[in-house]
Amino acid sequence: MTVRPVFDANATAGGKDLGNLPDWDLTDLYTAPDAPEIKRDLDWLEQACASFAADYEGKLATLDAEEFLNCVLRNEKIDTTAGRLMSYAGLRYYQLTTDAERAKFLSDLQEKVVNYSTPLVFFTLELNRLDDGHLDKLFEANDDLARYKPVFDRIRAMKPYQLSDELEKFLHDLGVVGDAWERLFDETIAGLEFEIDGDALNIESTLNLLTEQDRSKREAAARELARVFADNIKTFARVHNTQAKEKEILDRWRGMPTAQTGRHLSNHVEPEVVEALRNAVVAAYPRLSHRYYELKRKWLGLDVMQVWDRNAPLPMEETRTVGWDDAREMVMSAYAGFDPRMADIAEPFFDKGWIDAGVKPGKAPGAFAHPTVTDVHPYVMLNYLGKPRDVMTLAHELGHGVHQVLAAGQGEMLSSTPLTLAETASVFGEMLTFRRMLDKAETPAERKILLAGKVEDMINTVVRQIAFYDFECKLHEARRGGELTPDDINALWMSVQAQSLGEAFDFMEGYETFWAYIPHFVHSPFYVYAYAFGDGLVNALYAVYEENPEGFQEKYFDMLKAGGSKHHKELLAPFGLDASDPAFWDKGLSMIESFIDELEAMES
């Protein structure tokens, strides 16, 4: 049984007087933590898991197609109920991670769900002992069952790495302990205080200062981040060491060839496709980030840039605060301009309490869209502070939301999209919003600011995330050789930063600790390449849309509706695209290059 993930984006922003920012209304899940429906669903879950095991354990091989379908449907209903419970507890916790009662509620509920679902561990283990031929006959006999073949394919991809039934049950029960390290990380991050000009700020507001026009404010924020990270570096190093060691033990017992194998399997993507993406991006560093940051260095009038200049606004850029209503209009008009149906799907997010937008003490940093379960709806979390970048984050997370709504028709087991494709609709939503803003630019200076902002976002999505991926690869490889000191981890971080950012940068003392706050390294090892995958994929998709818009929308909606029911090859075939072709990634990267070309041409 899996509880579906949240999909993250890195939110950074700033501003005031933003209008009426919406809060979540979680009552579509449950009305309150003591609602009788929670006890009802927990009681049902306990009984359903026990009876499922009693009815099917040791008997999967004896079931005919109709009986097997009934077994799958019962498993799916268990997934839905557990997912609903955990979604409610998790979202409530993210609203106020520093609240002990919410943390306890989440932890207690998680323990119950894990304990109740332990009897289900046999299902995937027994399924993987069935012959391919036996399963093929069952699929041939029943079309409704055959619909679930992609789920079985993903489960059976783990077959070579499966342990004994007893060990798998033990690991299932132990999962709660591993999650405690994630919560330690979350609570530590949410509880950090940064003092800037006498004000105590949380991490989101402090990171936001790195995009201020005033260079002294950016420097003060960067130095304060470094000071606070250094004060807490032993805790962060302990979390990373423990998580990486736990992963190494699991991978070794399972016989996984690399630390990345598990992520590739869950993403339903071949290692060579990810390697081709990684190699294409690293080879393009000089043509992308190095070239762009050299331009930016000149625009800022600096001999060398510091890390606090990376996301600085351009000198000619006016400090602009985008109110919530304006942000909504920008994104919704871009969505409607592509297809009115897209705006119709996005509308309820704003009006029905499906977005939690404001920055609040104790709230989790960043942004995400969480699909909850297919018979409810997704929820979007932002930390909206009114910067133009925040508008892009709204467009991004709303794209996830639209995708999750469309995919819900597949049902619980088939709707969840592998992370590589899960970033498609989000990045596409950003691209639609950017293109609309670019079309409305009234002066060359305005166009330049928009183009530069988009290039920076793309570099953050592609170059920075592949550098993160390389850092994780190095971290997990190094941890296999023993405990890593904070200095060891710092050195690994700096080795990828200098390579990816180029010679335009100098690195202040203290920047070596900035790996500490990235949540993906702790929550979802190797998640980060999904961003670069999604960006490259969307750039290629958008090129197809521009070349031949006729009928594109229908194909695009079909792709989103497919959820996790098809492999990336099948999903991209209608567009004439193939991510396993090494040249595919160069297509996506060439769009970023073309924007940099235009910016360079403006200089001459």
Image (spheres, helix red, strand yellow):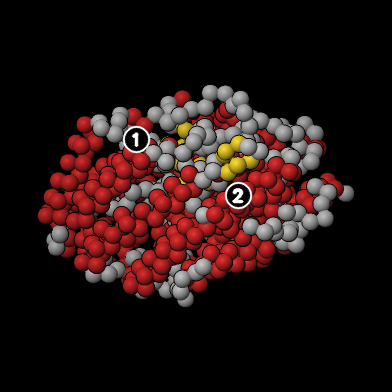
At label 1, the amino acid type is Val
Q: Which element carries disc 2, helix, strand or loop?
A: helix
Could you tell me residue 541's position as x and y percent?
Answer: 58, 49
Indicate the quadrant where residue 238 lies: bottom left
Q: Does any portion of residue 583 appear in the rendered image? A: no
Residue 225 bears which disc, if any? 2
Report the residue marked by disc 1. Answer: 376
Residue at the image position 65 percent from the left and 45 percent from the top = 221
Q: Is residue 333 above or below residue 538?
A: above
Indicate the quadrant where residue 442 lies: top right
Disc 1 from disc 2: Cα separation: 39 Å
Q: Which element carries disc 1, helix, strand or loop?
A: loop
The residue carrying pointer 2 sits among few (fewer than 14), some (14 to 19) or many (20 or more) residues within 10 Å by Cα, namely: many
Residue at the image position 27 percent from the left and 45 percent from the top = 108
Of mark 1 and mark 2, the one earlier in the sequence is 2
Taking depth in this image into account, of 397 and 482 the one nearest to the observer is 482
Could you tell me residue 136's position as x and y percent?
Answer: 27, 62
Residue at the image position 14 percent from the left and 51 percent from the top = 50
Q: Is residue 163 left or right of residue 352?
A: left
